[in-house]
Image (cartoon, helix red, strand yellow):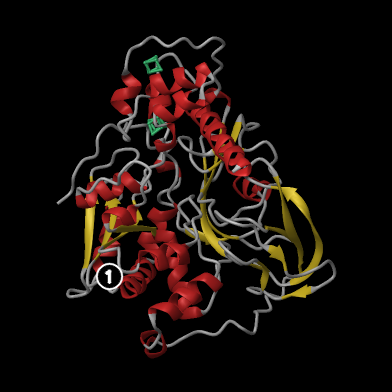
Amino acid sequence: MAFSFFGGVHPKENKHYACDVPVQDFPAPDLVVIPMSQHIGAPCKPLVKKGDLVTMGQKIGDNAGLCVPVHASVSGKVKAVEPRAHTSGTTMMSVVIENDHLDTLCPDITPRTQEQVDALTPEQLIDIIHEGGIVGMGGATFPTHVKLSGGIGKVDTVIVNAGECEPFITADDRLCREMPEKVIAGLKIVMKIFGLKEGHIGIEDNKPQAAAALREHIVPGDGIILDVLPAKYPQGAEKQLIYAVTGREVPSGGLPAAVGCAVFNAATCKAICDVVYEGMPLIRRIVTVSGDILMEPKNLMVPIGTSFNDLLEACGHSEYPYKVLSGGPMMGAAQYDLSVPTIKGVNAVTVLGRKNEYAVKDPHCLRCGRCIDACPMHLMPVLMYKALESGSVDEMKRNNIMDCIECGCCAYTCPASVPLVLGFRVAKQMIRNEAAKAKAKA
Ligand code: SF4
Ligand code: SF4
């Protein structure tokens, strides 16, 4: 049974730009830039140096602790190991590879038969997923092997997130339409790791072709349940999806495993399938390049490390972009340097024209309360913003700012254009800084 989560909004979907465009292979560029951090946790240390020759799929960065390896997405020569611009707005140590266009595959990459996969233990599967560099590909980039190993014995419900509620983005929609068998195979591997007989796929009702393709590939008796949910933003947010599918509420500050759930993005499931069956690490992903000024919006299978500039050039634009976002317009991050590379968590590049421009000089809260009605986390955005303005970290904590999922529903509904989400990001950083200072003193 599907439950409807509290709050949320219905922004203009704008999926029509790219939803009917099949995924095309993007030709690997002459140069790729592979950042050493594409996940939550410790950055990788480069395993190669300038002048080294690398093969496609070769591990080129790794580290101890909470870390996920990175791999070369092309074969060629390492041109540099140096800090380069990153979608986070900072610079990041990166391996720059000159593509030799030979696509020489790493000799470690070997496919497995179904019998070989069936013989793997949960521990072996988790190790393969870790070594394959798999992270949450919906944008969160949480290390998948950690979610899996931490959930064993706690998780009784696994959910594939095919919600994709952000406007413009159609990468998962196309994935489910064109490669449903891979999404399902990835889910079955996750079910095996957790020892579950049942698994869910949550999808919004505005993607009927994707739902039909998935349904067609679900074999009766497999234990896979397709949950078609009413389209509402942010249906694809982890906590809202869990509530919609199970009726369980993840407690404040808690993880989904606290209520027996684990959520994996559809693209993550495909990546799990690729590494387990084909031995192929995460070196390319589907990216929707869309927006209101693009000549040809596309869904592209992009080698990791391809620059945003290359992607924009492939789609063309009718005017100079006002804004280029990594992700969609609700949660995406504006980019000021388009040489940034596509990384594992980038599901879209959204390119907006001047008509989207707005500037609010002196936003004053009207006390209308719309932000409170819209917040799917039951928070009080207006009071959270006041806490930020007070500068008191205690006040910010009292208003549960850390529970904000930065979905943007409050800012979307605010008639006064108060920069709520921007403010909450600043407030969260202030809380983290204070915690770090306290830890250093202790
Ligand atoms: S306060 Fe945070 S969680 Fe609530 S609507 Fe605003 S951005 Fe979303
Ligand atoms: S929606 Fe905007 S104007 Fe209305 S209460 Fe919230 S912050 Fe104030």
Crowd band around label 1 with a 10 angstrom C-alpha radius: few (<14), some (14–19), many (20+):
some
User: Which residue is located at x 69 percent, y 78 percent?
Assistant: 104
Residue closest to the eye, 297 or 412: 412
Residue closest to the eye, 36 or 356: 36
Residue 65 in picture, x, y percent from top left: 58, 64
In the rendered image, which quarter contains the C terminus? Answer: top right
Dividing the image into four quarters, tell me where ligand 2 lies.
top left
Secondary structure found at label 1: helix
Left or right of 124? Residue 207 is left
Left or right of 232? Residue 84 is right
Q: Amino acid at mark 1?
A: His
Residue 109 in picture, x, y percent from top left: 58, 81
Left or right of 106? Residue 155 is left
User: Which residue is located at x 76 percent, y 70 percent?
Assistant: 48
Give the total of numbered labels: 1
- Residue 353 against residue 236 in the figure, above or below: above
State the residue position of label 1. 217
